[in-house]
Image: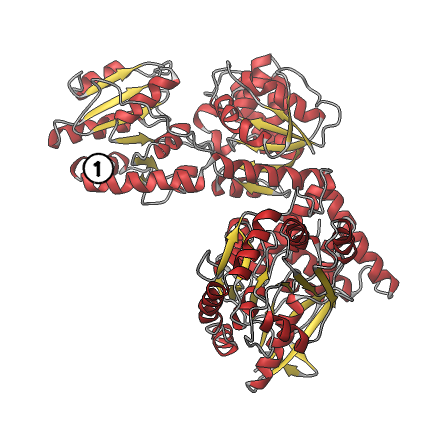
Amino acid sequence: MRIAVCRPQVPFAHGGAEVMTDALVAELRSRGHDADLVTVPFKWYPGARVLTQAFLWRLLDLDEADGQKIDLVIATKFPSYVVRHAEKRVWLIHQFRQAYELDGTELGQFGDSAEDRAVRRKVQTLDRIALGEASRLFATSANVAGRLERSTGLVAEVLPHPPQDLDYRCEAYDGFVLSASRLDRAKRIDLLVEGVAREPGLEAVVVSDGPDRGRLEALARDLGVDGRVRFEGRVSGERLAELYARCSSVYYAPHDEDFGMGPYESFLAEKPVVTTTDAGGPLDVVHDRQTGLVVAPEAAAIAGAAAWLRDHPDEAARFGRAGKAFAVEVTWDRAIARLLS
Amino acid sequence: MKVAYFSPLPPERSGIADYSTLLLPELRRRVELAVVRRGRRRPPRGTDVCLYQIGNNPDAHGWIVEALRRTPGVVVLHDFVLHHLVAGLTIGRRDGHGYLAAMEREGGVVGRLLGHAVLDKRIPPLWENRPEDFHLAGEVLDLATCLIVHSRYVHDRTRAAGYEGPIRVVPHPAWPAPAAQAADGVAGEPLFGAFGNLNATKRVPQLLEAFARLRLTCPGARLLLVGATSPGFDLDRRLQRLGLDADGLIREDYVSETRLWSLMSACDAVVSLRAPTMGETSGTAIRALALGKPLVVSDVGWFAELPGEVALKVPVDTHEADMLTAALELLAQRPDVRTSMGAAAAELARRQHDVGRVADLYAAALEEAAGGRRVADAVLGDVAQAAAEIGIEPGAAETGEIARRLAEVELGR
């Protein structure tokens, strides 16, 4: 089949959605499909720009490419699913969250003006129309599916996606806690940094990059823990696999996350996850005292959980192995079979 | 965003006053509300959008229509047919010319002539015997920037009447059923209840006839009639003719809200008939759903849109009394049907008519109405500018394509 995988592009940014869609294209190709990635830059501000930029997708003609029919499109996150196609399938990573659950929070975008309120409603209308057109609708987690149903009434099948392809292995439980999330505020890495300050002897390694990096490094300096919190920036796949292989636990506690590959990557390295009760998608697979520790979204609780796993390597290993039993079930073979069925 | 809210409110005795009392606390949680004092015709300073609750009672809604004339806004159309309202605001205020103008606007010369005949008392009032032929909603529709309606029926009628603005179908909110005890001494095997004014529009003659027939096969059945008897409706004579006495009939006049709930709680099923319909939603039927009572309704308007699992629908035709008798017999003889219909009714009230959900839908409609035009202008401006910059002129084939795509996702005007 000729398949177009649709994904918006935020120039110079690279995160979970990019990893997932790149992998999807590669996996489709490896199964003999003629797959390609279709991207359009996306800027969601100011004012009504979110709508005009989303509308660009509506003008695309993906019926054919170079005279050859495109059999199927797989759209992923807002606004790529605004695209038109007779066989549009949506594997929803997330909607435009600023128009939904983030509205009115510090992560929201829309103010109280009549125009801002109306833009937000138009985004919701756009979602109802564009997602309602899909011939099949999947969501990457129960959290994403739940938000979708609450906001639009549309029901999606839950279909988690496998994490990025790394040389996952478990070599040791060396005592440090690893954070591999993108450095933006929603990932709440500041709670981990503050937690390290409260828990003498606890060490953390923070990899990846993002707009919150400067603030986090300054926070670590101010708290006097820059020796115990090491920022490594964006690292290679080999280095990331090595860190997964040797950490004692993985910190993954964004607020109301869509899906989150972090737990799956952690589990494939047989490492437990420290997350929080309000983390959203990760709670599909991180179960307290079974595959990790689920605590209150507070620095002290997070530090206490990471320290406990450091001090109890047998339990950490047991939780990690239990998590692996979940993670190995999430394969590209299964995901693609359902997507194309 | 600030919303000016125009509605009758208690202590006015009006179904829409009760409706607003239920809705306002939830709506306040979602938008900034300024409830406009009765009689004021201008919204408060800083208002982004006005919301007008429009029903057919000229005393309760006359000042609201006058405010709407000054400041167009979002109209909640509780009835599609507004003939009674318009008659009250014109003939009721000795403004015969206003009535003639309204009739002419809708019915042309024929309408005007009929209006004259009404004014001269040569024919009965049209709002009593032909309201559906002359809805007289035209002025209100012209002034509405967005409509909120409670049924597809009213949606379709307003579209057919030429309204081109946005219409939001929002369910009527359900009152949370109070933990009221069923009224003492009010019972039957089973007990049917009918609530509201007693008149021909509520199909009381047909109900009495059907109930009298039911009593032949189910002598334990009783009918509870609650509400004032409309002028000119000779209830006693009808009861006498049908042989319905205190053994089969329980009668209460206008009752308090508390008493209403306890009486309805005592019923095994509620009958809520209507014809002709003005497009209205029945507060009685909504309360019955909230209490988990099976319904018998007329198969018209909003009532016809109730799911079959909660309501038996009786067509308004020559077989009406026969069908109504059959519906009453089914409910009288099958407690299991009553139970399953009641459970479905309670679920429907919880799922569809939850007041929080209704307030969410109101907030969405208000927010779109307040800023939607400016947003549409911004989007169209952006797209038009980009098109012009690469030489796509108005009227070009590409422009039509862009307009179609915008319309598909409701981003056009």
Image quadrant in which the N terminus of chain A is located: bottom right
Front residue of this view, candidates A207 and A257? A207
Which amino acid type is marked by label 1?
A: Leu
Residue found at the very far bottom of the displayed protein: A32
Q: Secondary structure at mark 1?
A: helix
Q: Is residue B117 left or right of residue B3?
A: left
* On screen, residue B360 above or below B230: below
Which colour assignment does the render follow?
secondary structure
Q: Is residue B311 left or right of residue B373?
A: left
Q: Quadrant of residue B387?
A: bottom right
Q: Quadrant of residue B262?
A: top left
Does residue A192 show up?
Answer: yes
Label 1, residues with CA under 10 Å away: few <14, some 14-19, many ≥20: many
* On screen, residue A236 above or below A46: below
Residue in the picture at 73% in, 42% down: A115
In this rendering, the count of numbered labels is 1
Front residue of this view, candidates B96 and A257? A257
* On screen, residue B100 above or below B411: above
Front residue of this view, candidates B300 and A4? A4
Residue in the picture at 58% in, 58% down: A258
Q: Chain of mark 1?
A: B
Pointer 1 residue: B331
Residue in the picture at 64% in, 58% down: B408
Q: Position of residue A248 (x, y in %)?
A: 56, 65
Q: Position of residue A313 (x, y in %)?
A: 50, 65
Q: Position of residue A289 (x, y in %)?
A: 45, 57
Q: Is residue A251 left or right of residue A14?
A: left
Front residue of this view, candidates A230 and B345? A230
Q: Position of residue A91 (x, y in %)?
A: 56, 66
Does residue B198 show up?
Answer: no
